Image (cartoon, rainbow, N blue to C red):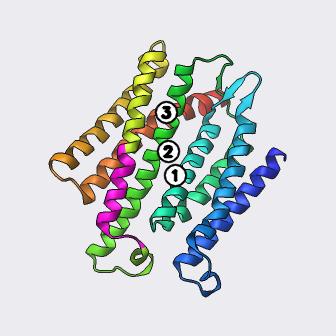
Amino acid sequence: MTNLLAAFLAITLYLGCTVLLMMKMRQSASIAALSKQMILIPGFLGLGAHLYTLSMSMMSPIGINIGFFTALSLVSAFIALFTLVSALRHPIEILGIVVLPIAAVMMSADLATTSIHLLPPGSSGGLIFHVVSSIVAYSILGLAALHAIVLSVQNSFLHKHQPGGLIRLLPPLRTMESLLFDAIIIGFVCLSLSLASGMLYLDNMFAQQLAHKTVLSILAWLVFATLLIGRWLVGWRGRTAIRWTLGGYISLMLAYFGSKFVLEVILASA
């Protein structure tokens, strides 16, 4: 299978799954007989084609490419994976309706552009662990940020006593908040591993080209740590939890993708 064919297949399956999820949430009679597991199958197949496309664009004899658009596509694939798995257990299909089209767009952008940042062959296992744990952390905390946005909308509608439409199909607020903090805890652990492995295996995390990334990543870690402590000691929830979640993820995205965009896209084309 060629890279373009796999990408086209992934986009088609992602969008097909999105349409089915929308029809399911609207309780369309035409798919009433289909279980949620059956509806999610095209999403998982699309994810498989997406990962195949990524493997073809990332792996080469001269190293592993984790350029800006490739990294975006990889993170979107992980977010799609975590969303689909979560949707199997919880009624959060609305996240899939948002995530799957975004994954299709990110994959298309990766194929349509050229951004190269190679990990050379023979890179240490510690460095690879740092990269993988970073990407997993960005993905899980990205899902948490998206979850926080949905929670914010749900919270707003309920406070206005307008629980209709798609909002009534979501789990109760307490369940949504519990799922949000589950994602934050897992993402925080991965981010901690990423920072720890970076300090161990990178020559100098505070070198000029890495200083802003390191500082913003540590700032994001502090934000999420404060949020979890506040949740544990004071019972932070609702808008407070939403604001801290989004603030932490913005810092994290600026740390990684902000610096990569400047170095690999803006300065590379200058």
Instruction: Tell me which amino acid carries mark 3.
Output: Ser
The image position of residue 59, as x and y in percent, is 72, 31
Residue 60 visible in the picture: yes
Disc 1 vs disc 3: Cβ atoms closer than 8 Å?
A: no
Image side of residue 180 versus residue 86, left or right? left
Residue that carries the numbered disc 1 in the rendered image: 82
Disc 2 vs disc 1: Cβ atoms closer than 8 Å?
A: yes
The image position of residue 5, as x and y in percent, is 82, 52
What residue span does the magenta drawing correspond to?
170-185
The image position of residue 166, as x and y in percent, is 45, 76
Say which of marks 2 and 1 sits in front. 1
**Among the 4 quarters of the image, the one containing residue 53:** top right
**Label 2 to label 1, Cα distance in Å?**
8 Å
Label 1 CA crowd tier, 10 Å (few <14, some 14–19, many 20+): some
- Tell me the element at label 2: helix
Q: Earlier in the sequence, mark 3 or mark 2?
A: 3
Instruction: Tell me which amino acid carries mark 2.
Output: Ser
**Label 1 to label 3, Cα distance in Å?**
15 Å
Instruction: Tell me which amino acid carries mark 1.
Output: Phe
